[in-house]
Amino acid sequence: MDQPSGRSFMQVLCEKYSPENFPYRRGPGVGVHVPATPQGSPMKDRLNLPSVLVLNSCGITCAGDEREIAAFCAHVSELDLSDNKLQDWHEVSKIVSNVPQLEFLNLSSNPLSLSVLERTCAGSFSGVRKLVLNNSKASWETVHTILQELPELEELFLCLNDYETVSCPSVCCHSLKLLHITDNNLQDWTEIRKLGVMFPSLDTLVLANNHLNAIEEPADSLARLFPNLRSISLHKSGLQSWEDIDKLNSFPKLEEVRLLGIPLLQPYTTEERRKLVVARLPSVSKLNGSVVTDGEREDSERFFIRYYVDVPQEEVPFRYHELITKYGKLEPLAEVDLRPQSSAKVEVHFNDQVEEMSIRLDQTVAELKKQLKTLVQLPTSSMLLYYFDHEAPFGPEEMKYSSRALHSFGIRDGDKIFVESKTK
């Protein structure tokens, strides 16, 4: 059902959190008393507002009465206004300026690109620490204004904004720790490097679904660009070279990497992908969301050595030589066939006769008796069979159950089957 258009923030707030829709809860600070309002106001005398307000997809286009917003929202710390119809930054400012405790604001999927954000409006956002502008098509000019006026901003979400380039502001933002800028079209490293200039304190950079084609930067320059980067996501990027993976080692504090869905790794098996990446990134402790244990790292590094052992020297990566110094040259692992044995050569003893024969291990004791019937000249009903393992310390084991499969005895080449007659 479509939401009505042209609704104010206050109208939606009163409707959603009225006593009829949101039962009164007793407790300090839960009920919010509102001073008397003009006749005809939709407000109730008392509403129950949580500190986290979710008003997404409500058709909100404007703020409404600012005095009422201030009366209701003095304690609100998180506000989700995503997927509404807000297209004027002045209206957003009217809301936010009357929510003094606000730290988290989600404005995703509002058509805010249709208006210019002035610094006077952006100033009302000054206490916000986490700002979500996904699919808002916010221009870089708007982002620069926000960065200038939000001195405490720590997390910024700029996904799905159709960015093909990055524009640097005149002043960098030292407070930002986390940047989500996924699902744009940032293919060239010359654009990504600007993010390092803009946000020198960046701890987490999420670049998934940007089709970045290469990391074109010298190692020493990478360290200066992202000196504090701890986590990076290159999920579904366009990386095609192992050299790009090796360059991740240049980030001095990098601990976590996501590299799923990149063209470079498509030809490899699932095991090869993880082990070859783990071996190349010795400082990374978490790959694709999974912790890299000490045991996994050693297994991966040994696997890496064996993987490249027969590759021509001019094609061997530098990491191979580092690991040879650590482990020495390793012989290829012996190929062990773990499939169950299908047959065995055994000695069949009957009276004073000994006959060597091959028997199928997938057959039953009853079927073996049929196979031996001609050899021992006894009807199957008169046979007693005993199995003797030539390496076992115990004596012969009677094969008394006709339906038991021979492989369950663990019969191997060289073992013995003794046949006796029940009438003996």
Image (cartoon, grey):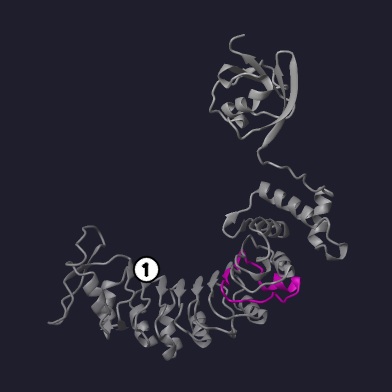
> Residue 248 location, x and y as percent?
69, 66
Residue 115 visible? The answer is no
Identity, as a three-letter code, of the amino acid under mark 1: Ser
- Judged left or right of residue 11, residue 144 is right
In depth, the one of 57 and 148 nearer the eye is 57
In depth, the one of 88 and 374 nearer the eye is 374
> Residue 231 location, x and y as percent?
60, 64
Which quarter of the rendering shows the C terminus?
A: top right
Q: Residue at x 73, y 42 (%)?
A: 336
Residue 35 visible? The answer is yes
> Residue 318 location, x and y as percent?
81, 62
- What residue does disc 1 label? 77
> Residue 85 location, x and y as percent?
34, 84
Q: Residue at x 61, y 25 (%)?
A: 369
Which quarter of the rendering shows the N terminus?
A: bottom left
In depth, the one of 124 and 196 nearer the eye is 196
Q: Secondary structure at mark 1?
A: loop
Residue 253 on the magenta span: no
Residue 206 on the magenta span: yes
- Judged left or right of residue 87, residue 384 is right
Query: Residue 227 occupies which quadrant of the picture?
Result: bottom right
10 Å crowding of disc 1: few (<14), some (14-19), many (20+):
some
User: Magenta span covers which residues?
Assistant: 205-233
The correct choice, above or below, for 61 with respect to 289 in the image is: below
